[in-house]
Image: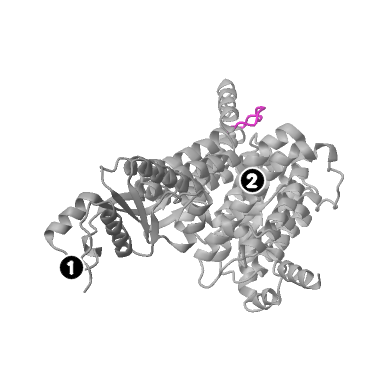
Amino acid sequence: MSRWLHRAWGSAGSLLPARSDLAAMRRHPRRDLLAGLTVAIVALPLALGFGVSSGLGAEAGLATAVVAGAVAAVFGGSNLQVSGPTGAMTVVLVPIVAQYGPGGVLTVGLMAGVILLALAVARVGRYMRYVPAPVVEGFTLGIACVIALQQVPSALGVPPPEGDKAVAVAWQAVLDFAAAPDWTAIALAAGVAVIMLGGARLRPTVPFSIVAVVAATVAARLLDLDATPIGALPAGLAAPSLAFLDLSAIGSLLAPAIAVAALAALESLLSASVADGMTVGERHDPDRELFGQGLANIAAPLFGGVPATAAIARTAVNVRSGASSRLASLTHAAVLAAIVYTAAPLVSHIPLAALAGVLLATAIRMVEVGSLRAIVRATRSDALVLVLTAVATVVLDLVYAVIIGLVIAGALALRAVARQARLDQVDFKPDLPGEHGDEEHALLAEHIVAYRIDGPLFFAAAHRFLLELSEVADVRVVILRMSRVTTVDATGALVLKDAVDRLHRRGILVLVSGLRPGQVPVFDSVGALDQAGGRHPGTPEAIEHARAHLRRAGVLPPAPARA
């Protein structure tokens, strides 16, 4: 019992902060502080915008960036990750707000945090690396489209239409704008987006998002433009509370919570991988990252925040700004907290259209044209998976989109693997023991045929294999060379059993050679080789057995007597 407890404690201990984290924070504190300040300036308009888009208001976005950003920085599995509200999560939250209200969103975030902790303890993080690139790219493209569609009402300066489908809401907003056009909001949103996109090309290190938002806010105030502001913000974070928790709705919120947890895990681990790729020597701990995101999603709702994930864009800014430890992301959270407590009245004057411009530019920058082009050109299967995942993200929702993408990618991969399975007739003469003349070679070839099975013998390829093997010509002995069978499952073993039984009923002796020891239990479990004449370590031994069988049947002359 004590040994089990010691092992469990050691496993749990690997998910907690280590002394090495503190040591890393002491190496380059000035560089980390500057990087954190830069990320905070970039994150401020994004946090405000994603809070508004989620339906819980700008204050929810700020609370998420501060609380989740700090907790994930301490407990997460990456030294360089920056967490907070993201566009992908906003896409998931909009229908939850519409159906369950703000309390439902906060409850979902709390439940998702518990699910993420369970995934971390179960060590599921390592399996996220198997998500195919076309699914990830299609998912990202679909999210970018949904984020852009969600900004259409604010960018047009019309009240958000009811509904949770981005396409329908955007179309209704266009119709409302056409009925009473006002170009103020469009000018502000377009101006912010142009400044962000153009400035990023000229000076990538300058946080043009905050520059554009400040310029739009000042212009709206000085010119007395009719632009709707985000509204008053509380001068501080809400006190921790569980008043929002509705225990009666937990059952109906389980499915949305699983969706939020799956998205948080996928986006956070993807972001951590991006951070690793941008640095030398950095490697994240996927299970600890899930643990940190779980704690962050438990903490954020207590302060009125929405579910959070790691943010790829902010993480990339953090790395490019020279961050080397968790101190940078902690500084980002501290700076945003200072803004919440000292500059809330100023922030409340930012026009909604300006935030819409920020998110429109963010959506455009999320799309990596080079990566999309490379995947589309790779294979038709990859292009199909990418397009279907993106369309499903826009039309359905993110979780269904990922499931659809994974199922289609898996089916296409199985088809490709199944095509590698081959049943080839091979010449057995090189393996024929002893010295033999052409006449005996010809006689043996009339009665013995050898087949080599290459590749996987599993459900996706097995039935084609059965068809080919069952059509063997009228011979006396069939030798199956199985040393190149890479994998086998129950379906493959059953199909082989059927083929062997059919040949046996035709009076054909089946011999097996080269069977791998690890595959024997699968064949024996279904009796696949019960009707086979024997198993041999190599082809020469199988041929010798076949010759002996043919001599007993009178097909070959008896072996010459030894002197």
Q: Quadrant of residue 83?
A: bottom right
Image height check: is 315 above or below 87? below
* Label 1 with label 2: CB-CB less than 8 Å: no
Range covered by the magenta-colored residues: 156-165
What's the distance in space between the residues labelled 1 and 2, CA to CA? 74 Å
In this view, the residue in front, 514 or 24, is 514
The scheme the figure's colours follow is one colour
Q: Is residue 550 left or right of residue 340?
A: left
What residue appears at the point 60 percent right and 73 percent down from the top-left corner? 31
**Residue 222 visible here:** no
Q: Main secondary structure of the magenta part?
A: loop
Query: What residue does disc 2 label?
Result: 89
- Label 1, residues with CA under 10 Å away: few <14, some 14-19, many ≥20: few
Q: Earlier in the sequence, mark 1 or mark 2?
A: 2
Q: Is residue 164 magenta?
A: yes
Task: Indicate the secondary structure of the residue bearing disc 1.
Answer: loop
**Tag 1: residue type?**
Glu
Would residue 386 appear left or right of 18 to someone viewing this image?
Answer: left
Residue 128 image position (x, y, % from top left): 57, 55
Residue occupied by mark 1: 435
Q: Up-down: is 415 above or below 549?
A: above
The residue depicted at 22 percent of the width and 60 percent of the height is 558
Q: Secondary structure at mark 2?
A: helix
